[in-house]
Image (tube, grey):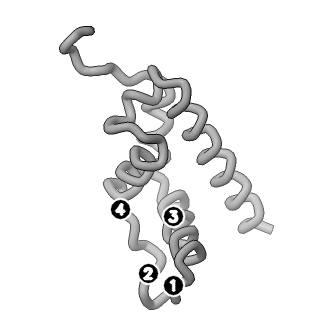
Amino acid sequence: MSDKPTKGGPVARQAAMLCQDRTFRLYLDRRRRHKFGLPEGDLPDGTHSEQDARDWICAACGIESRAELDHDTAAAAVFTNICLRYRNWKRRAQQ
């Protein structure tokens, strides 16, 4: 095994862009409120930062760096499901 850090590719870039997406961070705010039954006052919209989104994706995918998404098929599959759930939420929110 090499000591060189894992290099990210297209999936890592997609994850980075997702973390910059304000609507995705809003999705994380609302998802967390729903999951834990929190009122909006306890977790207002706009709470999740880019770093929070990055940390959440890494934790959900079981990785330490988004670069691993291009090298770990299980983590990439989890990320794909995250993207699908987000797109479905976004589509429903626009109706």
Mark 3 and mark 1 residues within 8 Å of each other at the beta carbon: no
Above/below status of 23 relative to 69: below
The residue indicated by pointer 3 is: 28
Image spot of residue 63 (x, y percent)? 38, 37
Mark 3 or 1, which is nearer the eye? 1
**Distance of mark 2 from mark 4, alpha carbons?**
13 Å
Q: Secondary structure at mark 3?
A: helix
Amino acid at the residue labelled 1: Leu
Q: Residues within 10 Å of mark 2 (few under 14, many from 20)?
A: some
Q: Earlier in the sequence, mark 3 or mark 1?
A: 3
Q: Earlier in the sequence, mark 2 or mark 4?
A: 2
Of the image marks 3 and 2, the number of the one nearer the N terminus: 3
Q: Residue at x 55, y 40 (%)?
A: 79
Residue 67: x %, y % from top left: 37, 28
- The residue that label 2 is drawn on is 43
Q: Mark 1 or mark 2, which has the lower sequence index?
A: 1
Answer yes or no: do the residues labelled 1 and 2 have beta carbons within 8 Å? Answer: yes
Image side of residue 49 versus residue 25, left or right: left
What is the C-alpha distance between the residues marked 1 and 2?
7 Å
Quarter of the image for residue 50 reads bottom left
3 and 4 marks in contact (CB < 8 Å): no
Read off the residue under disc 4.
49
Of circles 3 and 4, which is in front? 3
Local packing at callout 3 (Cα closer than 10 Å; few below 14, some 14-19, many 20+) is many
- Give how far apart the Cα atoms at labels 1 and 4 are: 18 Å
- The residue that label 1 is drawn on is 38
Q: Residue furthest top?
A: 1
Separation of disc 3 and disc 1 at Cα? 13 Å
Q: Is the C terminus in the top left, top right, bottom left or bottom right quadrant?
A: bottom right
Q: Is residue 84 above or below residue 53?
A: above
